[in-house]
Every structure is written in structure tokens, then in C-alpha cells.
Amino acid sequence: MKHGCRYGTHRVIEPAGTLPQPALKLDNSTEIFDNEVLIDVITLNIDSASYTQIKNACGADPERMRSMISSIVRERGKMQNPVTGSGGMLIGKVMAIGPDFPDKKLKVGDKIATLVSLSLTPLNLKRIIHLDPESDQVDVEAQAILFESGIFSVLPEDLPEKLALAVLDVAGAPAQVDRLVQEGDTVCILGGGGKSGVLCCYQAMKNVGPYGKVIVVEYAEQNAARIRDLGLATHVIVADATQVMDVYNKVTEITGPRGCDVTINNVNVPDTEMTSILITKGQGLIYFFSMATSFTKAALGAEGIGKDLKLIVGNGYAKGHADLSLNILRESREIRELFEKLYV
Ligand code: NAP
């Protein structure tokens, strides 16, 4: 065996000189380097923006979706959607650990969730066992590689593994909300009725306290109703987040013309950058967790209307994010029941 690059550059086939995430093609051979881990994959949790794009492109036909996913992995050696650029994450069982892998507590046979994106994870996909167009969790027969720098979490014993996978996929979002939202803030969560949205709402309500506001903008009445029923926001607006002026008018009816202190963007569709920008106060802050965000549109759009804002790219990793997000399920029986119904 050989020692590979800590960041996995030894697996990049093309273009030479790039890291695995932006690379077009990775070496997905299952013979590991000294500082890698080989994982027997159970389930892929495909990122929502990616899965939605695949589903739309295939007319929600499961056979076409299977073949599109298989061909992406065949071409790229990883599950990175060429349109959205995004990946997702996986759960699986550790099959082999190179002698130089730094975490000495990890054991062969442990069940883990990788906390690095599928968009940089070498994946050798043999077969798709189960795919449901309504669920972004896809059961597979496959092997994956974790690099020396790859973060992971051993799956907790008190939660079903698919539930943990669903939550860990979006763990960065509530962890960032915890960092960014202060007591008394007015916060707007676009796409607040989805998976990451619900976790963000819970965390935002906790952080703003009794004098703050949490406003959810959600497309589907059913998802909006969930937020109302669970008391996860102070205000719920049913609207299409791509309709800038409509959302701006509805949000500012609640906030006044000043707008929100913090906006969290959790939608899974493009063209919501300007909505986020318009509803946020000058010198306020926007966290774009959505992978459908165009950072060109956001940056040029803010400049275009002369708005000085902090625009934060949705880094999926924040220190302690796995524990924080799993603890939400432990703290809130209602969210746990909802997630068990929707994602397990
Ligand atoms: P999700 O469960 O599908 O939630 C998305 C929510 O947005 C849904 O409730 C959806 O409503 C709503 N929505 C869609 N179009 C809308 C519109 N036009 N107006 C208002 N609401 C709308 O997705 P998720 O798993 O929480 O992921 C959310 C986003 O985060 C995705 O873009 C995903 O790619 C991204 N993500 C980022 C990272 C990262 O590391 N930064 C990691 C994981 C995921 P409907 O159900 O009615 O469509």
C-alpha cells in the first residue's frame, strides 16, 4: 500500500492539479491507500437540490432516475450531479482501515455516516437496490473511500440509522443558525418546512427567545401547516420564494420596511437569491445553505441594489454540527416523530 495525499488528490484523474471536489473524474478503485478507509455503502442520501434536478429531468420515473444516477457515477467515479455540482452523503459499514488513518478509535465493522460530500467521495456503484422518487435516500450495493481529511460520525445507537442519515445530511444548517442568530433577532427561513428548514426553525426559535421573530416562507401549504402545528415559527407565509416582490411585501408586513436581521435560505430550487437579499436589513446577514444558490446572482444582485450585507456560503460543516443536530431529535419528540414519518 502507499500513502495518499491527505486531501485525496492522488485519486484525481482529471483535470490534474485539482482537489477531488471540483475534479471531473476520480479513481474509484477499492484498493485503499495507507491513510484511507474503505466503506461498504448501505444508503446514499442524495442532496435535495441534486435529487430534485434528477427527478425533474427524468419525469419522476424511477427507472430513468436509476440509470441517470448510475451513469453519473460511472462517468465521474463519484455521485456529483453535473448540473447542481452537489452530492449528499452516505451511511455504510467500515470494511478496511489503512494503518495510517489518523482516527485510531474507528474499527472495522463500525457503522458510520460520512460528513463530507458525495461530490468528493470516490464511489464504486455496483447496483441500486431501492430508489423511490419521493425519497432522496437510495439503497445501494457500493463501496466508497474516505480520505485522511474526511470527517465522519459513528452512527448513534439510540436513533434509527436512516433517521440519523437524514439529519446528518443537513447538520451544518442548524449549527450555523446557532452561531448566527442572537436573542431578539428577526429571522426569516426560506423553505422552512423542509428537512433542514425544520431543524433551523427549531434552533432559531430557541436562539431568538420570547422577543424575537421567526418567519417561515414555504411553498406547500402542507409543509407550512407542519410548522404552524409544531409551533416552530412565530409567523408562517405560504408563498413562492422565487416571486421576489410578493415575498418582500408579505415579509415586510410583519417586519416593517427594515426587514430581517438574519435570513436562512433552505430552498431546493434556483432563483431565490434576490428574495433573500430584499427581505434582509442593510448590514444584515444571509446564510445560503441552499445548493441551488448562484453566488454570482447573490453577490452581483446585492451590489446592484446597493445593499451592504454579509453573504455566507453554506459550508456543510460546522464544529459540533453532528451532535447539535442529532440532539434536536432527542430534545423534540415532535420533530423526531415527523422525521420518522417522512424520512425513515
Ligand atoms: P428539502 O427537505 O427538500 O426542503 C426544501 C424546502 O424548500 C421544501 O420544503 C420545499 O417545499 C421548499 N421550496 C421549494 N421550492 C420553493 C419555493 N419556490 N418557495 C418556497 N419554498 C420552496 O431540502 P433539504 O434537504 O432541507 O435541503 C435544502 C437545501 O439545502 C437544498 O438546496 C440542498 O441542496 C441544500 N443542502 C446544502 C448542504 C450544504 O452543505 N450546504 C447540505 C445538504 C443540503 P416543497 O416540498 O413543497 O417543494
Image (cartoon, grey):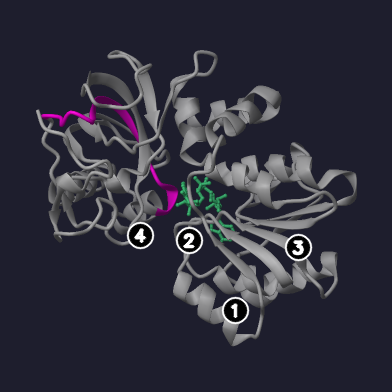
* Element class at badge 3: strand
- Which amino acid, by three-letter code, is at mark 1? Ala
In the rendered view, tell whether residue 25 sits above or below residue 29.
Answer: below
Of labels 3 and 2, the one closer to you:
3
Q: Nearer the viewer, residue 72 or 330?
A: 330
- Find numbered disc 2 in the image and state the secondary structure of the residue it sits on: loop
* Magenta part of the chain: 31-49
Query: In the image, what residue type sits under mark 4?
Result: Thr
Residue 61 visible in this rendered orientation of the protein = no
Lower position in the chain sequence, tag 4 or tag 3: 4
Residue 39 is covered by the magenta coloring? yes
Secondary structure beneath label 4 = loop
Q: Quadrant of residue 62?
A: top left
Where residue 40 sits: x, y (%)? Answer: 24, 24
| Label disc, if present, on residue 302 of the rendered structure | 1
**At 13% across and 31% down in the image, what residue appears?**
30
How far is disc 4 from disc 1 in space, using C-alphas? 22 Å
- Measure the C-alpha gap from mark 2 to mark 1: 19 Å
Q: Helix or strand or loop: what does disc 1 sit on?
A: helix
Can you tell which mark lies on residue 157? none
Q: Sequence order check: which comes first, mark 2 or mark 4? A: 4
Q: Earlier in the sequence, mark 3 or mark 1?
A: 3
Residue that numbered label 2 is attached to: 269
Disc 4 target residue: 84
Q: Which residue is the site of mark 3? A: 261
| Badge 3 amino acid | Asp
Please identify, in this view, whether the residue under mark 4 or under mark 1 is nearer the observer. 1
Instruction: Please identify the quadrant where the N terminus is shown.
Output: top left
Q: Amino acid at mark 2?
A: Val
